[in-house]
């Protein structure tokens, strides 16, 4: 079990979609859009397919439906992009298709891409359980393609000493984060939310995983 806390976020700008952040996206999708008119016997497939390709990025963000920020590691973004481009290139290698086939295949690739992105983001978060305490990893924000990082709290502690150290590290992280927020807002407030009082001494001595999970969930 791991309690995942998104402690650092990036302010969302215009939705671009995760794949849009890949270095080859513009080149690849420019080619796909410019050659769409050669892929179907039926003229009605052309505007439909063109719209799918044009709206690919924005539609991706709409379909992700994640309860956590859409932030993906560069490694996993490369993996998703490689899989999508491979499917798209194979589709474009064929000759002209019968009516309806080409846009349907584009939709299938789109849905597969959404699932790949969802799984990539969630898998990175779940990897948190392999660590004890605060762990951070570098990501790219799918909202605006800027570099970001995700911080999470893992429960994989092998001793009470490690657990106490992990909780203390979490408190220190929160204090630092609270200080940043206080300075940014230019208004005085407590550096530790009341919801985290249960993680402060002298409560650490008798703290259980269940107690900590309940305390952190209330933040």
Image (cartoon, helix red, strand yellow):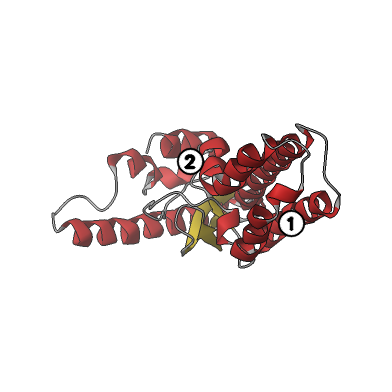
Q: Which residue is mark 2?
A: 207
**Seen in the image, is 120 located left or right of residue 11?**
right
Q: Nearest the camera: 127 or 130?
A: 127
Badge 2, how many Cα within 10 Å: few under 14, some, many 20+?
Answer: some
Residue 185 in percent (x, y) is at 18, 56
Q: Residue furthest left?
A: 187
| Residue at 45 percent of width and 59 percent of height | 169
| Residue at 60 percent of width and 60 percent of height | 73
- Vertical arrangement, residue 22 with respect to residue 42, above or below: below
Q: Mark 1 or mark 2: which is in front? A: 1
Q: Quadrant of residue 168?
A: bottom left
Badge 1, how many Cα within 10 Å: few under 14, some, many 20+?
Answer: some
Residue 187 in percent (x, y) is at 13, 54
Residue 177 in percent (x, y) is at 33, 58
Q: Earlier in the sequence, mark 1 or mark 2?
A: 1
Q: Mark 1 and mark 2: span between their CA atoms?
A: 49 Å
**Seen in the image, is 3 located left or right of residue 34?**
left
Q: Secondary structure at mark 1?
A: helix
Asked if one can make out residue 158 in the rendered structure from this viewpoint, the answer is: no
| Residue at 61 percent of width and 40 percent of height | 47
Q: Which residue is mark 1?
A: 85
Q: Nearest the camera: 74 or 87?
A: 87
Whether pointer 1 and pointer 2 mark residues with C-beta atoms closer than 8 Å, the reply is: no
Asked if one can make out residue 152 in the rendered structure from this viewpoint, the answer is: yes
Quarter of the figure with the N terminus: top right
């Amino acid at each position: 079990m791991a309690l995942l806390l998104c402690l650092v976020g990036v302010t969302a700008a215009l939705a671009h979609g995760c794949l849009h952040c890949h270095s080859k996206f513009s080149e690849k999708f420019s080619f796909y859009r410019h050659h769409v008119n050669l892929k179907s016997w039926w003229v009605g497939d052309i505007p439909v397919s063109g719209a799918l390709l044009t709206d690919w990025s924005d539609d991706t963000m709409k379909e992700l439906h994640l309860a956590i920020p859409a932030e993906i590691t560069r490694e996993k973004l490369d993996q998703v992009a490689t899989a999508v481009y491979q499917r798209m290139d194979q589709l474009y290698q064929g000759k002209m298709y019968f009516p309806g086939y080409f846009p349907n295949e584009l939709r299938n690739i789109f849905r597969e891409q959404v699932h790949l992105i969802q799984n990539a983001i969630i898998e990175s978060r779940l990897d948190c359980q392999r660590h004890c305490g605060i762990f951070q990893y570098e990501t790219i924000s799918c909202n605006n393609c800027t570099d970001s990082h995700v911080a999470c709290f893992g429960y994989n502690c092998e001793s009470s000493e490690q657990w106490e150290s992990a909780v203390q590290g979490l408190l220190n992280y929160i204090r630092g984060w609270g200080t940043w927020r206080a300075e940014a807002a230019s208004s005085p407030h407590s550096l530790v939310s009341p919801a985290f009082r249960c993680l402060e001494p002298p409560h650490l001595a008798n703290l259980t995983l269940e107690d900590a999970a309940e305390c952190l969930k209330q933040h």
